[in-house]
């Protein structure tokens, strides 16, 4: 999961992209990058860390131009500790292309070999984004060879890209001197939306991962980019669009609504907040069918994504809703932090119990999901230490039993607490007095009800169905190897370099 944004304007965009990345910071805290373009010259700065730490005044001054894009990253492919794999990525031919990508290519390794053996293109990192930009560059070169680069030629190239790459991808790319290209995979797994703003200097167009980015920067939302669709914004701000996939279907990632997206975002016509309220209603039904509500004194959410579901559940049960945990907002989210050792260490750093809400009570804790179980186990223990008489746990999502290969940092199956275990065995592991999970089909039904035009959901981590149809045992082996290699990497190696296209001396 990453957050991406691209802008074409008639005024400098460096500050605007910075502000947009702050609004997308929840989608990735490992690295950040911005590239701008002035004429046909690109200026880039990217490094590991949060947006506010990566960009200083001197960096912002070195990013001139009215066109640009940016990304916040947490790694789902490649090396978590490599700044060289931070985005954006750049290739100089054809035209000069800079690209950011949210998602994960499931056939990246096969494509890497194909690019080297057939297309004569060299890939220097383990990042699937470098593979993607080289596939796009090759197809643009083929489509527009000896011809002017028109929107139709660009769309032809995207159609060829769709035929070659598999997996999930929302992409924004700058083509030097021509404009901004954005496209989405044929299943619409990863989100992408665009909007406009009318400025005194002329029209400004922004493309981003979430609608909150557009609203927070005073842009009017036009619509979501459709699955398989490509849009091209020329330098004057004119938007061209074409469907480039043969059989597109709208099956967005369910985990966006469960956890990843901000609650104030709207994705593919579905309010994330309303989706979480609906999940709370169906979870309440599960609780009632599992245990007498009279045994529950209070409902307490585990901050922050679970709050809407917990509020709705409490209302349905007729029980008080209380904030029993205070979150330290200045500690990285557990789910995003690479490395299990850090994950264990950070739970008590970021949450503290309010003892008065627990003492002598039977509490129902509500979390958005239970992935590894290590966090849930420690939170249950914290509730007991705060004086709870009994601690029940409810998950607004179903059991996470399968790895995700579409761009979420979901562990290998051996790390998933629900894989190969019964609900009773999970309950024993986390130490709760009762454990209630969301029902998979009920969750799909109540979220889909918010947009009848959906064809389904990418919910592989819950149901084991990989909608692209190309996921193999080898893919899971590759994921396991990547996670093991990341665990062995030095987080701050002495040879690490900070990359930039321009003004390297100013950024050191």
Image (tube, rainbow, N blue to C red):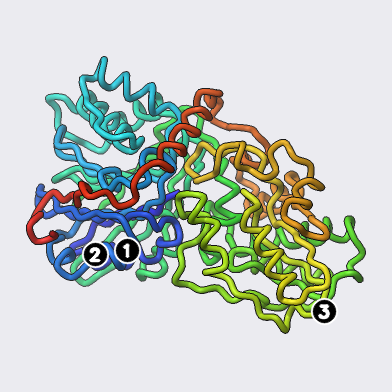
- For label 2, the SS is loop
Q: Hey, which residue is sitting farthest top in the picture?
A: 118
| In front: label 3 or label 1 | 3
Q: Which residue is mark 2?
A: 55
Query: Residue 229: horizontal and vertical position, in percent?
Result: 41, 39
Residue at which label 3 appears: 360
Residue drawn where x is 53% and y is 69% of the image: 350
Measure how far apart labels 3 and 1 are at the Cα level. Answer: 43 Å
Q: Secondary structure at mark 3?
A: loop
Residue contact at pointers 1 and 2, CB within 8 angstroms? yes
Residue name at image x 40 percent, y 58 percent: 29
Task: Tell me if mark 3 has few (under 14), some (14-19) or many (20+) residues whose alpha carbon lies within 10 angstroms of its own.
Answer: some
In the picture shown, does residue 454 fall above or below 323? above
Residue holding disc 1: 51
What is the CA distance from the residue labelled 3 to the residue labelled 2? 48 Å
**Which class describes the residues within 10 Å of circle 1: few (<14), some (14-19), or many (20+)?**
many
Q: CA distance from mark 1 to mark 2?
A: 6 Å
Residue located at (18% from left, 35% from top) = 149
Q: Quadrant of residue 294?
A: bottom right
Does 26 sit left or right of 96 as displayed?
right
Give the side of residue 386 with respect to residue 476, left or right.
right
The disc at residue 187 is: none
């Amino acid at each position: 999961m990453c957050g991406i944004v691209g802008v074409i304007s008639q005024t400098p965009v460096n500050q605007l992209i910075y502000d947009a990345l702050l609004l997308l910071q929840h989608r990735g805290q490992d690295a950040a990058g911005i590239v701008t373009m002035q004429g046909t010259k690109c200026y880039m700065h990217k490094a590991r860390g949060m947006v506010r730490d990566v960009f200083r005044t001197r960096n912002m001054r070195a990013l001139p131009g009215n066109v640009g894009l940016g990304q916040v990253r947490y790694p789902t492919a490649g090396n978590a500790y490599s700044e060289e794999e931070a985005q954006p990525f750049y290739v100089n031919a054809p035209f000069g292309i800079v690209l950011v990508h949210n998602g994960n290519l499931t056939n990246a390794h096969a494509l890497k070999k194909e690019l080297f053996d057939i297309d004569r293109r060299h890939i220097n990192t383990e990042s699937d984004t470098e593979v993607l930009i080289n596939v796009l560059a090759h197809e643009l070169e083929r489509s527009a060879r000896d011809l002017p680069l028109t929107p139709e030629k660009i769309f032809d190239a995207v159609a060829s890209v769709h035929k070659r790459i598999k997996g999930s991808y929302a992409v924004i790319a700058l083509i030097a001197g021509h404009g901004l290209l954005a496209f989405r995979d044929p299943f619409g797994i990863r989100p992408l939306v665009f909007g406009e703003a009318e400025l005194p200097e002329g029209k400004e167009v922004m493309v981003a991962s979430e609608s909150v980015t557009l609203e927070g920067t005073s842009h009017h939302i036009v619509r979501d980019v459709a699955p398989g669709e490509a849009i091209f914004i020329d330098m004057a701000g004119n938007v061209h669009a074409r469907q480039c996939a043969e059989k597109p279907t709208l099956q967005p990632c369910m985990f966006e609504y469960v956890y990843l997206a901000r609650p104030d975002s709207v994705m593919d016509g579905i309010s994330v907040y309303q989706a979480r309220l609906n999940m709370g209603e169906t979870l309440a039904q599960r609780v009632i069918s599992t245990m007498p509500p009279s045994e529950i004194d209070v409902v307490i959410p585990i901050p922050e994504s679970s709050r809407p579901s917990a509020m709705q559940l409490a209302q349905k049960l007729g029980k008080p809703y209380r904030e029993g945990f205070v979150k330290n907002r200045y500690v990285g989210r557990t789910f995003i932090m690479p490395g299990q050792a850090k994950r264990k260490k950070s739970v008590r750093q970021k949450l503290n119990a309010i003892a008065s809400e627990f003492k002598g009570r039977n509490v129902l804790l509500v979390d958005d999901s239970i992935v590894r179980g290590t966090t849930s186990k420690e939170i249950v223990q914290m509730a007991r230490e705060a004086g709870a008489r009994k601690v029940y746990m409810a998950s607004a999502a179903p059991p996470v039993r399968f790895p995700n290969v579409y761009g979420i940092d979901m562990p290998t199956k051996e790390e998933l607490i629900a894989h190969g275990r019964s609900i009773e065995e999970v309950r024993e592991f986390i130490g709760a007095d009762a454990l209630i999970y969301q029902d998979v089909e009920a969750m799909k039904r109540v979220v889909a009800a918010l947009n009848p035009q959906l064809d389904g959901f990418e919910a592989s981590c819950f149901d084991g169905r990989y909608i692209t149809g190309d996921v193999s045992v080898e893919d899971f082996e590759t994921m396991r190897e990547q996670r093991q290699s990341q665990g062995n990497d030095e987080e701050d190696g002495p040879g690490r370099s900070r990359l930039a296209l321009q003004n390297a001396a100013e950024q050191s």
